[in-house]
Image (tube, rainbow, N blue to C red):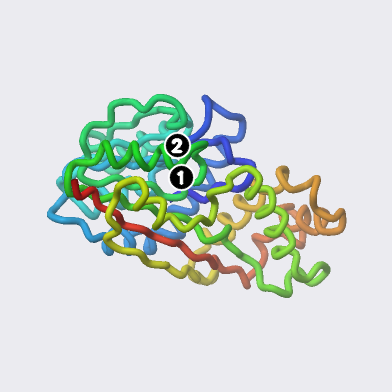
Amino acid sequence: MSDAPPHSAHHGHGHGHGHHHGDENQADMLDLGAQVLAEHIAGITAWLPVEGSPSRIVDLGCGTGAGTFALLARYPQARVTAVDSSAEHLDRLREKAREHGAAERVRAVRADLDADWPDLGVPDLVWASASMHHMADPERALRKVRDMLAPGGLFALVELAGFPRFLPDDAPADRPGLEGRILAVADRLRAEQMPYRGADWGPLLTAAGFTLAGERVVTVNIEGSRDEAVGRYALSSLQGMRDAIAGDLASEDLAALDRLLDTGGPGSILRRDDLAVRTERAVWAARRTR
């Protein structure tokens, strides 16, 4: 499950055109997100209205494998084809598969899904988390998924309702409300780059020939005191966002953000004990019925 900051509009996640500078930093962020959100990802896979036990799964825009490994754990007999445009992400995924003893169950495929799709077989389950809105033509991609699925197969589409929030509303003390202003800028930039961000995918799935089998919203609220990785996830996420929004942020806000990102300074986000991960995820399950 990937949470790409706005600078990543053309990175990994099923979009993109070759290797990009910054993929390694983004891979770090995705790994931290997978660690922090593991319980929520497992909860989504457990909810899916899958018929039987899928043996062939495709993870579209897999990032570093948060969804891939949740699906492998949920369906012990399954094999997963993990697709991404980033070589760095796929290298990390292969390394994790070896560490999990799951190398034989994972096939990593590098592909730009805005171009011609490779042969991904006939899966029983297709998973796309925070990747569909990156596509240049998501409606085409939905039709591709439908045509690829086995009859009766399920498509699980997971999207962020918004970029995670980490700070209290009144933080930091010298610039209260900073994160809200940062996210307002980021949301505006994302709306320009990715018009399908935040879309209602239900009608789009129906138009592509799917039958909706379930829909839900998952609320995430993880207190930082429960997991020290929350601080590193917040740092990595805001670092990834900084360069993309710097030109549109008030100079006082940019200076306050830089103080948060200065890991050696007294205002470092890593020194805060009031962090949390707060966001929502929307999930659609859609079936190929013919």
Badges 2 and 1: C-beta atoms under 8 Å apart?
yes
The amino acid type found where label 1 is placed reads Ser
Q: Which x, y percent locates residue 199?
A: 50, 55
Q: Residue at x 36, y 28 (%)?
A: 117
Q: In the drawing, does residue 149 fall left or right of residue 243?
A: left
Q: Which label sits on residue 262? A: none
Residue lying at the far right in this picture: please name it.
251
As drawn, is 60 to the left or to the right of 8?
A: left
Task: Give above or below for 37 relative to 121.
Answer: below
Residue 57 in picture, x, y percent from top left? 25, 42
Residue corresponding to mark 1: 131
**In this rendering, is residue 212 above or below 116?**
below
Q: How far across and how far down the image is residue 6, in percent?
A: 63, 46
Q: Nearer the viewer, residue 251 or 223?
A: 251
Label 1: state its secondary structure.
loop
Report the disc number at residue 14: 2
The reply, left or right, for residue 253 in relation to residue 290 is right
Question: Residue 158 sits in which quadrant?
Answer: bottom left
Tell me the quarter of the picture where residue 274 sits: bottom right
Q: Residue extending furthest bottom?
A: 170
Structural crowding at the residue carrying mark 2, measured as other residues with C-alpha within 10 Å and reported as few (<14), some (14–19) or many (≥20): many
Q: Please report the residue visible at 56 percent of the width from the left and 68 percent of the height from the top.
A: 276
Seen at 20% across and 51% down, the residue is: 75
The residue lying furthest to the left in this view is 52
Q: Is residue 170 above or below residue 189?
A: below
Lower sequence index among marks 2 and 1: 2
Q: Quadrant of residue 35?
A: bottom left
**Three-letter amino acid code at the position of disc 2:** Gly
Q: Position of residue 109 (x, y in %)?
A: 35, 29
The residue lying at 23 percent from left, 48 percent from top is 288
How crowded pointer 1 is (Cα within 10 Å; few <14, some 14-19, many 20+) is rated as many
Give how far apart the Cα atoms at labels 2 and 1 are: 6 Å
